[in-house]
Amino acid sequence: LAVVGAHLAGMPLHWQLTSRGAELVRRCRSAPAYRLFAIANSVPPKPALVHGGSAAIEVEVYRLPVAAFGSFVVEVPAPLAIGTVELEDGTSVKGFVAEPRALDGAADITDFGGWRGYIRSLG
């Protein structure tokens, strides 16, 4: 499972992975085909990963037991979704993506390279 925001290690929703026995497989970047947005009025703050750009975005990939994956996915709130994310090495994994409505009022934060860069910029 590729995560790009509030589920990254050290972020507010990371516990939703660790409490289900998720194991970090690797830290890497997406293929250079994405854009990243800060979703408006999201609590806690969350990003929206959208295919169709030209940037590689920081991701963490986790291994999650199949049964735990199901219980995790039912907690994913709209406008986020689980889809297919292409990684920098050309492989694909399931991961967080966003529905088009996630961009309503969202700020384009692609130039930060990832959620951590954006969060650091907030001070």
Image (spheres, rainbow, N blue to C red):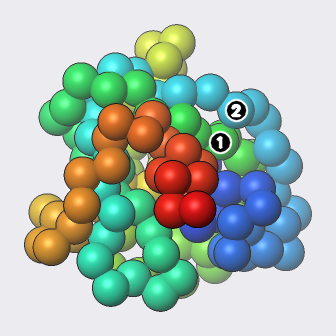
Q: 53 above or below 105?
A: above
- Residue 65 left/right relative to 93: right
Question: Which is nearer the eye, 95 or 112?
Answer: 112
Q: Residue at x 78, y 36 (%)?
A: 25
Image quarter (top left, top right, bottom left or bottom right) of the C terminus: bottom right
Q: Secondary structure at mark 2?
A: strand
Asked whether the viewer can see residue 109, the reply is yes
State the residue position of label 2.
Answer: 27
Residue tagged 1: 60
Which of the pair 42/84 is nearer the observer?
42
- In which quadrant of the rendered view does residue 6 lie? bottom right
Q: Amino acid at mark 2?
A: Arg
| Residue located at (34% from left, 63% from top) | 38
Measure how far apart labels 2 and 1 are at the Cα level: 4 Å
Q: Residues within 10 Å of mark 2 (few under 14, many from 20)?
A: few
Label 1: which secondary element: strand
Q: Residue furthest top?
A: 89
- Asked if 62 appears above or below 86 in the picture, the reply is below
Callout 2 touching callout 1 (CB < 8 Å): yes
* Residue 81 vs residue 100, the one in the foreground: 100
First along the sequence among labels 2 and 1: 2
Q: Disc 1 marks which amino acid? A: Glu
Note whether 64 is above or below 75 in the view shown. Answer: above
Q: Where's residue 119, x and y in %?
A: 55, 58
Which quadrant would residue 86 be assigned to in this image?
top left
Residue at the (47%, 75%) spot, across then down: 45
